[in-house]
Image (tube, helix red, strand yellow):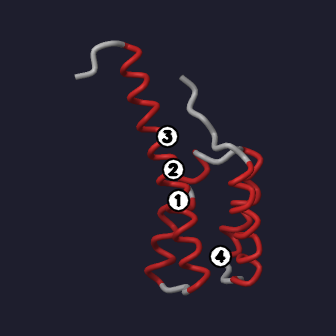
């Protein structure tokens, strides 16, 4: 039972951080799966994460993510693969967006 306001905030922040990590990892995993094997199932899984990712990545990466999503939807997988590698590198250098409490 969460009793204090501080405990509620900490619980909410922990949940946010866990969901953020799962979303970023899910996007990377499903994007990589699409680029390796663009099946309907892989594209469907990718679609579940492609919009939600914007809640958790820094604003500076929005255009990169948008372009990658467009390339995948256009089935331009060679160009998408290059952008995917760029995004993965950028995600390791930029801290994820934090929740304001």
Q: Secondary structure at mark 4?
A: helix
Quick check: 68 above or below 56? Answer: below
The residue depicted at 45 percent of the width and 46 percent of the height is: 19
The residue that mark 4 highlights is: 72
Closest to the observer, 48 or 91: 91
Question: Where's residue 41, x and y in %?
Answer: 43, 80
Instruction: Verify CB contact (< 8 Å) between mark 1 and mark 2.
Output: yes
Return the residue found at the far front.
92
Residue at 76 percent of width and 65 percent of height: 86
Q: CA distance from mark 3 to mark 2?
A: 6 Å
Label 4 environment density (alpha carbons within 10 Å; few <14, some 14–19, many ≥20):
many
Give the mark count: 4
Q: Alpha carbon of mark 3 to alpha carbon of mark 1: how far?
A: 12 Å
* Residue 14 horizontal side relative to residue 4, left or right: right
Residue 72 in the image: state x and y as whole percent: 65, 76
Q: CA distance from mark 3 to mark 4?
A: 27 Å
Q: Position of residue 22 (x, y in %)?
A: 47, 53
Q: Which residue is mark 1?
A: 25
Distance CA(mark 1)–CA(mark 4): 18 Å
Please tell me whether mark 1 or mark 4 is closer to you in this view.
Answer: 1
Quarter location, residue 1: top left
User: Does the residue at mark 4 contact the one at mark 2 (Cβ under 8 Å)?
Assistant: no
How far apart, in angstroms, are the residues tagged by discs 4 and 2? 22 Å
Choose the circle earlier in sequence order: 3 or 4: 3
Task: Residue under label 3, please give it.
Answer: 17
CB atoms at circles 3 and 4 under 8 Å apart?
no
Query: Mark number for residue 21?
Result: 2
Residue in the picture at 68% in, 79% down = 74
Residue 77 location, x and y as percent?
69, 83
The reply, left or right, for residue 2 in relation to residue 83 is left
User: Answer yes or no: do the residues labelled 3 and 2 have beta carbons within 8 Å?
Assistant: yes
- For mark 2, give the secondary structure: helix
């Amino acid at each position: 039972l969460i009793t204090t306001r501080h405990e509620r905030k900490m619980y909410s922040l922990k949940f946010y951080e866990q969901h953020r990590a799962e979303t970023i990892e899910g996007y990377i995993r499903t994007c990589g799966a699409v680029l390796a094997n663009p099946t309907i199932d892989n594209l469907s899984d990718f679609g579940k994460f492609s919009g939600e990712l914007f809640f958790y990545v820094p604003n500076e990466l929005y255009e990169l993510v948008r372009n990658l999503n467009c390339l995948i939807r256009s089935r331009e997988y060679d160009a998408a693969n290059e952008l995917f590698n760029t995004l993965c590198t950028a995600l390791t250098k930029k801290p994820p967006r934090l929740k304001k409490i």
